[in-house]
Amino acid sequence: MTESAFDRIATQYDRDFTDTRLARILREAVWMRLARHIRPGSRVLEIGCGTGEDAVWLARQGAHVLATDVSQAMLDVTRQKAQRAGVADRVETQLLDAAAPLSRVLGEGPGVRAAFSNFGALNCVGDLHPIAHALAEWVPPGGGLVLVLINRWCAWEIAWHLLHLQPRVAFRRLRRDGVDARVGGGTVHTWYPSIGSIRRTFTPHFELKRVTGLGVCLPPSYLEPVVARRPRLFLALSRIERSAASTPVLKRLADHVILEFERTASA
């Protein structure tokens, strides 16, 4: 179901999300953090590459990217985008369901300098423990792991839906068994683990070094029209976002969170 849902939106994903003003701001914030974990010549594993926007950016920084996704249609777009950008020699694609045992697909490591997953790809996986163990085999001690997940608490979402008398929607992310999210006319079951639970899942193989909020003042993508038609408000929120993203309390109420881990020497 997940694969078919993302197959259906592959050709329109960039139009509906990647190329919007909100998405560009949020993605650039991710790139700023991700840049600290890569260097020219590094090999990077990306889980849930989507249409390859991040893979192409990484390749342009000199990295060699193994871009994986559950959707073959998304991978097709990624390859086309890499070719147009002139970085096809540094972007390799591979079909991968992150919910399946990664070690069977990826083989044994270490094989990369860093691993990365953006914009909630791992929210489609109910149990992250197998992923943590597989990545521990692939990322060497001192290597980086950057995960961008949809956050459990989102101030924008809670306030908006409470204002519209929709308490079940306002607090839907708190459901332990996850929720069905609408994607491309289908549904994808989605989980919203807490920052603490993610940290515990990746311990002792990885140590959480930094948490940054993404979408603290700016709304979730489905609410972008609320502020997009008010340019001055959008600009003001964008400016505040930069400082709020690292504020201890506010960053934990963001739509997404950027979690930066370092591979430890622990087995």
Image (tube, helix red, strand yellow):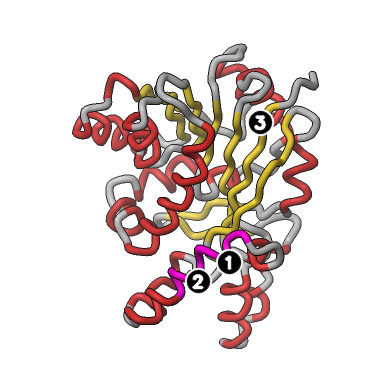
Please give the residue where the numbered disc 1 appears in the rendered image: 244
Which of 201/175 is in front?
Answer: 201
Q: Position of residue 9 (x, y in %)?
A: 35, 50
Residue under the point 63% across and 58% down: 151
Whether residue 244 appears in magenta in the rendering, the answer is yes
Query: Which quadrant of the rendered structure holds the C terminus?
Result: top right
Give the amino acid at mark 2.
Answer: Ile
Please give the residue where the numbered disc 3 appears in the rendered image: 131
Q: Dot 3, how many residues are within 10 Å of its Cα: few (below 14), some (14-19), or many (20+)? A: many
Is there a contact, CB below 8 Å, between mark 2 and mark 1?
yes
Question: Circle 3 sits in a helix, a strand or a loop, which is it?
Answer: helix
Q: Which residues are magenta?
A: 237-246
The answer to whether residue 136 shows anywhere in this view is yes
Q: Dot 1, how many residues are within 10 Å of its Cα: few (below 14), some (14-19), or many (20+)? A: many
Residue under the point 48% across and 69% down: 218
Q: Position of residue 177 (x, y in %)?
A: 73, 55
Question: Circle 1 sits in a helix, a strand or a loop, which is it?
Answer: helix
Q: Which of pointers 1 and 3 lies earlier in the amino acid sequence?
A: 3
Q: Is residue 90 left or right of residue 110?
A: left
Residue under the point 73% across and 54% down: 194
How far separated are the C-alphas under marks 1 and 3? 30 Å
Circle on res. 240:
2
Residue 185 quadrant: bottom left
Residue under the point 58% across and 73% down: 157
Residue 99 quadrant: top right
How far separated are the C-alphas under marks 2 and 1? 6 Å
In front: label 3 or label 2: 2
User: Dominant secondary structure of the magenta stretch?
Assistant: helix
Residue 266 quadrant: top right
